[in-house]
């Protein structure tokens, strides 16, 4: 594949670990069974004795006491927001995308290639990029069917809008592995964190160098997206101001208030280092001849990712 003309000569892709400090959701410590804690035996015994005493006194309070002590309280999971986020080039073609899932326990960013084959209800098989070009609803439905995870809506912006959003937050800090030359280039960094301008960040997130895999490019996009979420202002009014001039594209189905709520939640999780990105497990699709989802690996991946797992709607 020829080099992207916007790509600075030595801006080669770092691996995902080098792009930023590893930020993984804060799960239970190793060796934990993962089960909810049960009441201690002494507390149950005390409740039982108190209940017996109350019954002996001729009241119904004993039964209520025992019920409150022994019957487990509801442990319903927190509400999980999901969205398909897409960046397009100047021709409206998808160049990077991710399925986002966030709740009070953490945030997941499932990186998606545009050539992923999706089965759009009523329309048949097509690539995710082609589905995005048709409509946001088409892309969301196809992706949900492919990965078995609820997709609440789409947020689609162009490379220029991505650059403007980065500029609005004062740039993003990225550890670039090499150096770059030419107009708008990133200077020599040697894997040291450097603040990228909007245009630099947009190129770094979306351009693809000769011999580079799609996975490498998507991990760079993930690094920029994480840094952007972390850099968003804590204050809601300032955050809204940063988004004010960023015009989403027609394929966006999420209303602006929902986008603001989503980004606010992602910012909180990124700021708490409870935000992780991972590449969608892929496999060759015999049915389409393109790339499909590796369902076995996806199922194993979802076990360790609470927000994505909470939004799961089917076993695919």
Image (tube, helix red, strand yellow):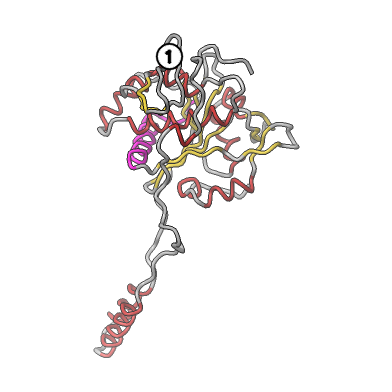
- Provide the major secondary structure of the magenta segment: helix
Along the viewing direction, whichever of 224 and 118 lies nearer the viewer: 224
x%, y% of residue 7? 51, 15
Residue at the image point whose x is 42% and y is 25% from the top: 190
Residue at the image point whose x is 59% and y is 28% from the top: 214
x%, y% of residue 235? 25, 32
Helix, strand or loop for disc 1: loop
- Which of the 4 image quarters holds residue 66? bottom left
Residue at the image point whose x is 51% and y is 26% from the top: 13
x%, y% of residue 18? 45, 33
What range of the chain is rendered magenta?
252-272
**Residue 274 belongs to magenta span:** no
Location of the N terminus by quadrant is top right
x%, y% of residue 263? 37, 34
Along the viewing direction, whichever of 97 and 19 lies nearer the viewer: 19
Q: Is residue 201 left or right of residue 242?
A: right
**Residue 254 belongs to magenta span:** yes
Residue identifier under label 1: 185
């Amino acid at each position: 594949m020829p080099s992207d003309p916007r790509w600075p000569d030595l801006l080669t892709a770092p691996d995902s670990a080098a792009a930023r400090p590893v930020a993984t959701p804060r799960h239970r410590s190793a060796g934990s069974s993962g089960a909810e804690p049960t009441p201690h035996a002494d507390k149950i015994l005390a409740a039982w004795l108190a209940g017996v005493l109350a019954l002996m006194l001729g009241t119904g309070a004993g039964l209520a006491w025992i019920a409150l002590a022994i019957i487990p309280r509801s442990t319903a999971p927190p509400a999980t927001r999901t969205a398909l986020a897409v960046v397009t080039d100047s021709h409206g073609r998808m160049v990077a995308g991710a399925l986002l899932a966030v709740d009070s326990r953490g945030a997941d960013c499932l990186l998606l290639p545009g050539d992923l084959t999706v089965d759009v209800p009523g329309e048949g098989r097509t690539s995710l990029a082609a589905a995005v070009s048709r409509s946001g609803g088409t892309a969301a439905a196809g992706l949900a069917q492919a990965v078995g995870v609820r997709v609440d809506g789409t947020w689609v912006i162009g490379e220029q809008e991505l650059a403007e959003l980065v500029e609005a937050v004062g740039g993003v800090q990225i550890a670039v592995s090499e150096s770059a030359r030419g107009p708008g280039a990133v200077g020599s960094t040697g894997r040291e964190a450097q603040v990228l301008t909007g245009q630099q960040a947009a190129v770094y997130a979306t351009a693809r160098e000769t011999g580079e895999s799609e996975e490498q490019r998507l991990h760079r996009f993930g690094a920029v997206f994480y840094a952007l979420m972390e850099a968003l202002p804590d204050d809601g009014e300032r955050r809204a101001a940063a988004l004010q001039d960023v015009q989403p594209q027609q394929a966006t189905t999420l209303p602006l208030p929902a986008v603001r709520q989503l980004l606010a939640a992602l910012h909180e999780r990124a700021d708490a280092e409870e935000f992780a990105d991972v590449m969608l497990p892929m496999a060759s699709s015999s049915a389409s001849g393109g790339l499909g989802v590796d369902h076995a690996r996806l199922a194993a991946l979802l076990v360790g990712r609470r927000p994505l797992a909470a939004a799961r709607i089917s076993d695919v």
